[in-house]
């Protein structure tokens, strides 16, 4: 089961790297603003949904690794963090990012740009925390 846990972690980390290295730069290099926005608004809800599923799978595998009354608590904790942060990204932060992006298109003021940057940074930060948490689970779990 530990091999399954490690495979899940590295599959997700690979997906994150693939998005960062290939998908994101390609979208902005080939699509105009409205098309890029439409693509990303369709892509990110799915990405966060799968991240939630990865978190839940980490919890389930960690429960399966619990033996003899000893709980694999570290894996359960990381799975819980991944699930909650991905849910927040999908249901709370992403809609706010989209709302501010719409405002920015209508009024590119410095205040709206700053708000967009802060929300986008928060989203990326939560995504990063999840990635680091999973790498730590692999390394120290």
Image: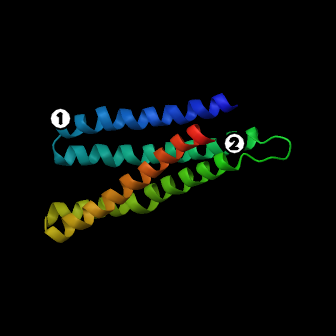
Quadrant housing the C terminus: top right
The answer to which quarter of the image holds residue 29 is: top left
**Residue in the image at 43% along x and 43% along y:** 47
Q: Quadrant for residue 109, please give it.
A: bottom left
Question: The residue tagged with tag 1: helix, strand or loop?
Answer: helix
| Residue 3 numbered tag | none
Alpha carbons under labels 2 and 1: distance apart: 42 Å
How many numbered marks, from 0 up? 2
Q: Point out residue 140 in the picture as x, y percentages from the top left corner.
A: 60, 41
Residue highlighted by disc 2: 62
67 relative position to 35: left or right: right
Q: Nearer the viewer, residue 51 or 6?
A: 6
Which color scheme does this rendered protein use? rainbow
Crowding around mark 2 (Cα neighbors within 10 Å: few <14, some 14 to 19, many 20+) is many
Tell whether 82 sits left or right of 107.
Answer: right
Which mark is in front, 2 or 1? 2
Identify residue for label 1: 30
User: Going 43% across and 55% down the picture, which residue do you hit?
Assistant: 126
Q: Is residue 89 above or below residue 56?
A: below
Residue closer to the observer: 87 or 79: 79
Q: Residue at 36% across / 52% down in the picture? A: 124
Q: Residue furthest right?
A: 68
Residue lying at 35% horizontally and 36% vertically, measured from the top left = 19
Q: Secondary structure at mark 2?
A: helix
Where's residue 36, x and y in %? 23, 44
Locate the N terminus and report the quarter of the image it occupies.
top right
- On screen, 105 above or below 75? below
Rendering coords of residue 80 (x, y %): 61, 53
x and y percentages locating residue 121 in the rendered image: 32, 57
Q: Earlier in the sequence, mark 2 or mark 1?
A: 1
Residue at the extreme bottom: 111
Is residue 39 or residue 72 the one in the foreground?
72
């Amino acid at each position: 089961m530990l091999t399954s846990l490690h495979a899940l972690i590295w599959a997700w980390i690979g997906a994150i790297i693939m998005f960062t290295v290939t998908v994101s730069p390609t979208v902005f290099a080939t699509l105009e603003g409205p098309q890029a926005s439409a693509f990303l608004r369709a892509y990110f809800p799915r990405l966060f949904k799968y991240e939630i599923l990865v978190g839940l799978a980490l919890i389930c595998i960690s429960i399966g690794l619990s033996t003899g009354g000893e709980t694999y608590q570290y894996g359960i904790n990381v799975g819980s963090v991944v699930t909650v942060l991905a849910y927040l990204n999908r249901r709370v932060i992403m809609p706010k990012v989209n709302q501010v992006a719409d405002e920015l298109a209508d009024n590119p003021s410095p205040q709206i740009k700053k708000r967009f940057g802060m929300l986008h940074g928060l989203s990326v930060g939560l995504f990063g925390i999840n990635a680091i948490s999973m790498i730590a689970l692999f390394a120290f779990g």
